[in-house]
Every structure is written in C-alpha cells, then in structure tokens.
Image: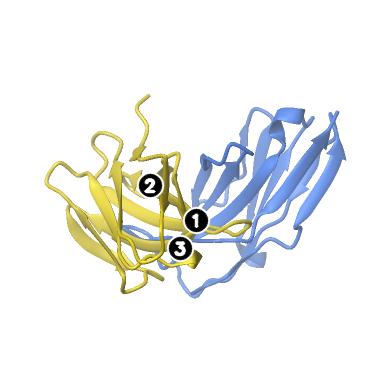
C-alpha cells in the first residue's frame, strides 16, 4: 500500500498560536484523493477536507487552511489562532489507489495536537 | 444533517464468540466502508461495498465477512473472536469519494 507519513506524533502549543501539521504521501498514481480527519477524545472521525490530485489550489475554511504541493507530495494543514477545542488527533489519509468507486483509505499514524489554555 | 448510524455502540464478547456489527449509511450514499482502529493506532481499511457488491478488500481476516443489503445497510460479521479483535470499528459511507464516518462500535473481547 502507498504510505502516508505524519512525522509529528505530538505537538503542543499555547492557545492562539498558529500550528501546522505535516503530511507526506507516496503515490504511483496520477489520480488520487487526499483527506484530513479530526478525531477528538470522544473518538469519532470528523471529515475536514477532501482534495483531488488535479486541484492544487490551497483552501481556507475559517481558521483552517490546507497547502497541497504535488511536487513534494505534501498536503499540510494549518490551524490559525488555535483554540482548546482544536485538541485532537488529526489524521491525513489518501485513497489506496486512484480513487473513485469504493477505494479504501490509507491513513497516516496521526498527529496528537494539544492546545494548552 | 443525517449521519452514518452504527449499532451497537458498545459490545462485549468472549473469546471464540461471534459478533455482528451494523451500519446504516447516510441516505443516498451508495458506498459503504469498514475500518478497524486498534488502541492508539490509525484506522485500517477492511472492506468496501458499492451498490451492494463487494468492491475493495483490505486487511480483513478470513474470520470476518460482510455484506451490503438491498436497503444499503451493511453488516460486519466476526467469528471466532480473538483478544486482538478488541478495537473501534468504523463504518463510513460516501457518494463520490467523500467518506463520512459513523461514531464507531467499540468491541471488547474478554
């Protein structure tokens, strides 16, 4: 399977700081999809974003932004002005193959983000 | 908005018993996925169904089987349970690739 690497196992910042979570992925496909999910202590997996490999536009949603760099196979996630409620494990994932149909996801190991008040 | 429904939310079984987990996808979603997440681990893809046909297979043990029914709900059947099967089992559904996850079923095998 093509790997997803989240090198930061844990990040701790003080509230209101900006924080970037890194994600690097392997790919042998021209077409694929990338995702970020949030897993708070309650355990559910919350969908944050999906990006397809043909769309390299960066995206901003409120305090969240994503930087997709196909040349470096990276899909980084930045939280601006972090809040305590952002504390969670964040997973980066990609479709196992080219996406479409019912392609399962391969996840990174996750980054545990701790926002201290 | 409607979400993915999973039942039961918690299940305790003994070794060698059988368990059945159910998943009800978001209305109009035609694809269902099953994932297993061990403690402190990332979710691992088990199996998926598209329009009631098995589509993709991941690291699903032979002791596990699944199907998707005519109303699009899905069931994961797990037999000869082992201690290592203790995990959070997620179902996800999608329409065109955006996978939305249910709250999970926490299975404990004693």
Task: Kindly identify which residue carries mark 3.
Answer: B85
Task: Kindly identify which residue carries mark 1.
Answer: B87
Q: Callout 1 environment at 10 Å: few (<14), some (14 to 19), or many (20+)?
A: many
State left or right for residue A59 relative to residue B102.
Answer: right
What is the chain letter for disc 1? Answer: B
* Residue in view at x 22 percent, y 63 percent: B54
Contact, CB < 8 Å: mark 3 with mark 1?
yes
Of B34 and A58, the residue lying toward us: B34
Single out the mark in the foreground, 3 or 2: 3
Contact, CB < 8 Å: mark 3 with mark 2?
no
Q: Quadrant of the N terminus of chain B?
A: top left
Numbered tag placed on residue A115 in the rendering: none
Question: Residue B39: image x %, image y %?
Answer: 59, 56
Badge 2 or badge 1: first in the primary sequence: 1
- Are the numbered discs 2 and 1 placed on the same chain, yes or no? yes
Question: Residue A104: image x %, image y %?
Answer: 40, 60
- Spatial distance from mark 3 to mark 1, Cα to Cα? 6 Å
Say how the picture is coloured.
by chain
* Residue in view at x 64 percent, y 44 percent: A66
- Spatial distance from mark 3 to mark 2, Cα to Cα? 19 Å
**Which chain is tinted yellow?**
B
Could you tell me if residue A84 is visible in this image?
Answer: yes
**Which chain is tinted blue?**
A
Single out the mark in the foreground, 2 or 1: 1
The quarter of the displayed image where residue A114 is located: top right
Task: Kindly identify which residue carries mark 2.
Answer: B92
What is the chain letter for disc 3? Answer: B
């Amino acid at each position: 399977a093509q790997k997803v690497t989240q090198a930061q196992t844990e990040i701790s910042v003080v509230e209101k700081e900006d924080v970037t979570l890194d994600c690097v992925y392997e790919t042998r496909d021209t077409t694929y999809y990338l995702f970020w999910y949030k897993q708070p202590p309650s355990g559910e997996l919350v969908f944050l974003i999906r990006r397809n490999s043909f769309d390299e536009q960066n995206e901003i949603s409120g305090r969240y932004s994503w930087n997709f760099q196909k040349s470096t196979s990276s899909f980084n996630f930045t939280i601006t002005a972090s809040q305590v409620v952002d504390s969670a494990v964040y997973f980066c994932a990609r479709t196992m193959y080219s996406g479409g149909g019912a392609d399962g996801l391969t996840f990174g190991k996750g980054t545990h983000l701790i926002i201290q008040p | 908005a409607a979400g993915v429904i999973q039942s039961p939310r918690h299940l305790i079984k003994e070794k060698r018993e059988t368990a059945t987990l159910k998943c009800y996808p978001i209305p109009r979603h035609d694809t269902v996925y099953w994932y297993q997440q061990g403690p402190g681990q990332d979710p691992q893809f088990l199996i998926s169904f598209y329009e009631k046909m098995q589509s993709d297979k991941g690291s699903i043990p032979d002791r596990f089987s699944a199907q998707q029914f005519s109303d699009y709900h899905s069931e994961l059947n797990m037999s000869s349970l082992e201690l290592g099967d203790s995990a959070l089992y997620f179902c996800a559904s999608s329409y065109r690739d955006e996978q939305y996850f249910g709250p999970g079923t926490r299975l404990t095998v004693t």
